[in-house]
Image (spheres, rainbow, N blue to C red):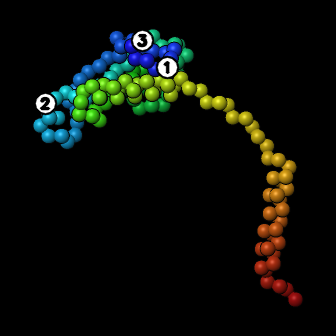
Amino acid sequence: MLTITNNLSIPLHEIELQSIRAQGAGGQHVNKVSSAIHLRFDIQASSLPELLKQRLLKLNDHRISSDGVVVIKAQSFRSRQKNLDDAYARLAQLIVAANTTNKPRKKSRPSKSSKLKRMDSKTKHGRLKESRRKVDY
């Protein structure tokens, strides 16, 4: 079980894992050991609540394909277990991001005193600019 929150978890059989060889520099070790993890999670076929599935599919994230599959490639570490933990953590972070809702913004209006201050400063600035003009006799 991959625990996301106290009341939300995903069974591990819904997550498809594949060990692959990591890219980049690293010498002989990188060329012979499959330490990178390719994680695939199908949103539609998962046991997540329907509302959370819809929110995940609406996210504008490059890791979510057009057919609703989350693809995460973890290759930051040299050890396979650390990359596996990193992939699980990134999946959990993505689901938590979809689960949080933003508080709606309340419309606010400027107070009467702030309006008066603004108008006074505009008037003062206008008078200052007016005093810089050329005097006509």
Residue at image x 82%, y 72%?
A: 127
* Vertical side of 135 occupied by 130: above or below: above
Three-letter code for the amino acid on which mark 3 is drawn = Ala
- Residue 90 visible in rendering: yes
| Quarter holding residue 51 | top right
Residue sitting farthest toward the front: 6
- Residue 71 visible in rendering: no
Three-letter code for the amino acid on which mark 1 is drawn = Thr
Residue at image x 56%, y 26%?
A: 100
Residue at image x 49%, y 20%?
A: 5
Label 1: state its secondary structure. strand
**Tags 2 and 1 in contact by the CB under 8 Å rule?**
no
For marks 1 and 3, the one nearer the N-term is 1
Three-letter code for the amino acid on which mark 2 is drawn = Lys
For marks 2 and 1, the one nearer the N-term is 1
Find residue 45 and name its label: 3
Spot occupied by residue 92 in the image (x, y as percentages of width and height):
43, 24
* Vertical side of 15 occupied by 82: above or below: below
Residue sitting farthest toward the right: 137
Residue assigned mark 2:
32
**Tags 1 and 3 in contact by the CB under 8 Å rule?**
no
Return the residue nearer the eye: 64 or 25.
Answer: 25
Spot occupied by residue 46 in the image (x, y as percentages of width and height):
43, 12
For marks 3 and 2, the one nearer the N-term is 2
Label 3: state its secondary structure. loop
Return the residue nearer the eye: 3 or 30.
Answer: 3
Residue assigned mark 1:
5
Residue at image x 32%, y 23%?
A: 39
Q: Quadrant of the C terminus?
A: bottom right
Question: How busy is the neighbourhood of tag 2: few (under 14 within 10 Å), some, or many (20 plus)?
Answer: few
